[in-house]
Image (tube, rainbow, N blue to C red):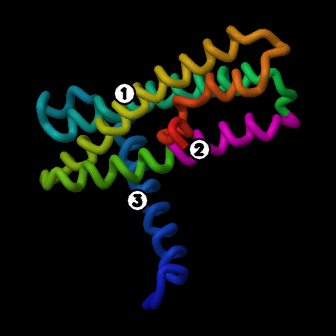
């Protein structure tokens, strides 16, 4: 039994990995089924539809984020520290949204597969919002002249983070 947070961390990592694996297996099993096999309005039908929507928005967000990284104009083999930080931030944001929405779905108190359906809906909404922010940042970056000052790039990327230096 773990005695402190440092000892619990590997167990938490394994539990998260198992939960993610379970969700992936569930969604892939659903992919082989016909969504119409489940009555409309049922948790399984909703799970199937939300799984499709999540895959679509995740792919769209991935493409948009790749476009943002391309807007840096760096060599992909040697990205700038700022481009690396943006890429790391996106990976961490995706992990946070997954965990946050999993908890939000569970906190609904729903039975059966409904907590997962609610959690997927949460992820879809968060990713749709993020997609707009990433697209705006990409458009801003493309609008800059190649000799633009660094602070102008930073202004383009400011909405990617929840905190700002305004007033500090």
In the depicted structure, whether residue 166 falls above or below residue 53: below
Point out which mark residue 19 bears: 3
Residue 80 in magenta stretch? yes
Horizontal side, residue 118 vs residue 30: left or right: left
* Image quarter in which the N terminus is found: bottom left
> Range of the magenta residues?
77-93
Q: Could you tell me if the residues under marks 3 and 1 are in contact, i.e. CB atoms within 8 Å?
A: no
Mark 3 vs mark 1: which is more N-terminal? Answer: 3
Task: Measure the alpha-carbon separation of dots 3 and 2.
Answer: 18 Å
Question: What's the CA distance linking mark 2 and mark 1?
Answer: 20 Å
Q: Quadrant of residue 140?
A: top right
Q: Which residue is mark 1?
A: 53
Packing grade of label 3 (10 A; few <14, some 14-19, many >=20) is few
**Numbered label tally:** 3
Q: Please tell me how crowded label 1 is: few (under 14), some (14-19), or many (20+) other residues with Cα within 10 Å.
A: some
- Taking the magenta stretch, the answer to whether it contains residue 124 is no
Of marks 2 and 1, the one in the foreground: 2
Image position of 72 (left or right of 128): right
Name the residue rendered at 74%, 40% in the picture: 84
For marks 2 and 1 on the same chain, the one whose residue lies earlier in the sequence: 1
Which residue bears the numbered disc 2? 91
Residue 133, percent from left and from top = 50, 24
Residue 22 lies, in percent from the top left, at 40, 55
Q: Residue at 26% of width from left, 29% of height from top?
A: 35
């Amino acid at each position: 039994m773990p005695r402190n947070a440092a000892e619990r961390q590997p167990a938490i990592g394994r539990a998260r990995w198992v939960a993610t694996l379970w969700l992936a297996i569930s969604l892939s099993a659903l992919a082989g089924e016909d969504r119409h096999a489940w009555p409309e309005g049922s948790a399984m039908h909703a799970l199937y539809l939300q799984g499709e929507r999540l895959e679509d928005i995740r792919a769209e967000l991935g493409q948009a984020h790749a476009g943002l990284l391309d807007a840096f104009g760096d060599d992909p083999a040697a990205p700038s520290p700022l481009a690396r930080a943006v890429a790391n931030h996106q990976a961490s944001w995706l992990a946070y949204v997954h965990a946050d929405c999993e908890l939000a779905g569970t906190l609904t108190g729903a039975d059966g597969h409904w907590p997962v359906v609610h959690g997927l809906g949460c992820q879809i909404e968060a990713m749709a919002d993020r997609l707009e922010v990433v697209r705006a940042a990409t458009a801003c970056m493309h609008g800059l002249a190649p000799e633009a000052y660094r602070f102008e790039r930073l202004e383009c990327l400011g909405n990617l983070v929840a905190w700002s230096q305004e007033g500090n």
